[in-house]
């Protein structure tokens, strides 16, 4: 890992640039641009390269996921797959019971080769019912969601200011949007980002 | 005991009067009616009429309770109204759990256990009124009346913003439960939001095919690695300062392990 990091570090510090020239990315022709963008999915049909659900089982590098529409997915996680669980994590952090969104490439055998997996990610709006030690009691459609502050990870974005690790400006009664990681089978979550309108 | 029974009319009466005024004169009465479970019960077009009719009934019962003489029928009417509230709340809970109860006017919270407790308490208090005579006020009775009113206010989610929210704000100000953390560690999200604003990220974002794969700090820089359609995009983001143009990027092939 260290040597890989050293290689990547020297690449960006040695030959890195402020922006990538368009030619670095391949053809500049319109057919390449539009060809890459066209997803080729009929409107109204499910995106074959996306899966959601909850992990039922983990075998080797494959996640067995039951979707909320009761469709089963097999999701293969490889070295290049990014996993998010309140931040980038390793594959070992995935647990049966975790909620999941995954994006990747559907293989001919039906397995989704994942490029990105987000575990337990939630994005909810509500108003702050109360604030107690390191916890925000969020009223989300009349139901309480207990949002935990995670030191070193949780940030607040006040209006359009840069994010801040200081959440102390949040007020009881105000509306917020919380991006975070659900704690499975509870009404609790860990905060990644709180968005405050002011 | 007679005094306590007679007192109840003067606790229920003002509450019903308030509820009636909120329904008949409230600026947001129409919106409240449409958000409430009445819209489901009476049909969307008739919700406002049903809401106003409830207000009229509440006003009539409040007037009967507050105006002399004290008759058993006053208590019966109040008990019938309270029983109606309970039935309505049960209906709202079962048939339209996401709708607000619309009880004391504008607020968007669904019927919760407190609303049931308040309606149940009103019912019990109304029953007490049925056999009551005229009220003779004594200091203990006045104190009891105030205590009952306080309980009813405490059970009213609509009124939380007048006392509970300011109280909680005060406690938060005194205790500081989310105190500012010591400076030092920069959360990853701070780096990522600076990254998203950078010309470097904008020039590469169309080709990124994963979320963050790896990240580490070195020499005042945070390195962030993404997959980019079979290749790797590496960003170097300064940990201090907020200048997006200082972010650097390189797009390389996966290094072969030595």
Image (cartoon, coloured by chain):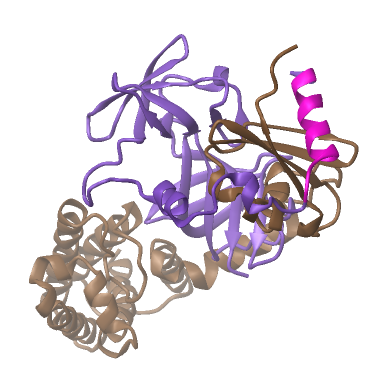
Position of the C terminus of chain B, as image quadrant, is top right
By secondary structure, the bulk of the magenta-drawn segment is best described as helix
Q: With respect to residue B161, does B17 lie above or below?
A: below
Residue stretch rendered in magenta on the structure? A3-17
Q: Left or right? Give the position of B80 relative to A82.
A: left
Q: Which residue corresponds to the image point at 44% horizontal and 74% vertical from the top-left?
A: B142
Q: Which residue corresponds to the image point at 70% horizontal and 58% vertical from the top-left?
A: B199
Residue B67 at least partly seen: yes
The chain coloured brown in the image: B
Q: Left or right? Give the position of A43 relative to A183.
A: left
Position of the N terminus of chain B, as image quadrant, is bottom left
**Residue A8 is inside the magenta segment:** yes
The chain coloured purple in the image: A
Residue A132 at least partly seen: no
User: In the image, residue B164 lies at what x, y percent?
Assistant: 53, 64
Quarter of the view holding residue B112: bottom left
């Amino acid at each position: 890992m260290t040597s890989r990091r050293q290689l990547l570090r020297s690449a960006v510090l040695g030959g890195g640039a402020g922006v990538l020239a368009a030619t670095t990315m391949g053809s500049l022709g319109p057919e390449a641009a539009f060809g890459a963008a066209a997803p080729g999915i009929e409107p109204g049909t499910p995106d074959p390269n996306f899966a959601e659900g909850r992990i039922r089982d983990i075998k080797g590098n494959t996640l067995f996921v039951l979707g909320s529409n009761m469709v089963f997915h097999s999701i293969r996680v490889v070295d290049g797959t990014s996993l998010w669980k309140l931040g980038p994590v390793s594959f070992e952090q995935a647990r049966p019971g975790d909620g999941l969104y995954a994006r990747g490439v559907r293989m001919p055998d039906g397995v989704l080769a994942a490029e990105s997996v987000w575990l337990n990610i939630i994005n909810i709006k509500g108003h702050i019912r109360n604030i107690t030690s390191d916890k925000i009691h969020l009223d989300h459609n009349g139901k309480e969601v207990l949002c935990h502050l995670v030191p070193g990870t949780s940030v607040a974005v006040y209006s359009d200011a840069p994010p801040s690790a200081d959440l102390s400006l949040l007020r009881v009664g105000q509306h917020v949007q919380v991006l975070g990681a659900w704690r499975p089978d509870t009404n609790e979550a860990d905060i990644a980002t709180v968005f405050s309108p002011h | 005991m007679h005094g306590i029974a007679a007192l109840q009319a003067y606790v229920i009466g003002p509450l019903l009067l308030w509820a009636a005024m909120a329904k008949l004169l409230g600026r947001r009465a129409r919106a409240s009616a449409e958000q409430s479970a009445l819209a489901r019960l009476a049909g969307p077009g008739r919700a406002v009429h049903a809401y106003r009719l409830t207000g009229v009934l509440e006003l009539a019962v409040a007037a009967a309770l507050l105006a002399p003489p004290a008759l058993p029928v006053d208590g019966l009417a109040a008990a019938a109204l309270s029983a109606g509230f309970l039935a309505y709340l049960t209906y709202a809970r079962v048939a339209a759990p996401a709708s607000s109860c619309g009880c004391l006017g504008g607020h968007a919270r669904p019927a919760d256990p407190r609303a049931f407790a308040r309606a149940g308490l009103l019912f019990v208090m109304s029953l007490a009124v049925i056999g009551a005579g005229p009220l003779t006020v004594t200091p203990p009775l006045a104190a009891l009346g105030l205590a009952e009113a306080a309980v009813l206010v405490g059970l009213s989610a609509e009124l939380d913003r007048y006392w509970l929210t300011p109280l909680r704000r005060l406690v938060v100000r005194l205790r500081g439960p989310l105190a500012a953390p010591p400076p030092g560690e920069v959360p990853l999200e701070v780096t990522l939001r600076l990254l998203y604003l950078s010309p470097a990220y904008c020039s590469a974002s169309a080709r990124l095919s994963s979320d963050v794969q790896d990240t580490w700090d070195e020499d005042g820089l945070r390195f962030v690695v993404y997959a980019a359609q079979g290749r790797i995009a590496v960003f170097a983001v300064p940990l201090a300062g907020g200048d997006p143009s200082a972010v650097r990027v390189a797009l390389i092939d996966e290094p072969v392990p030595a």
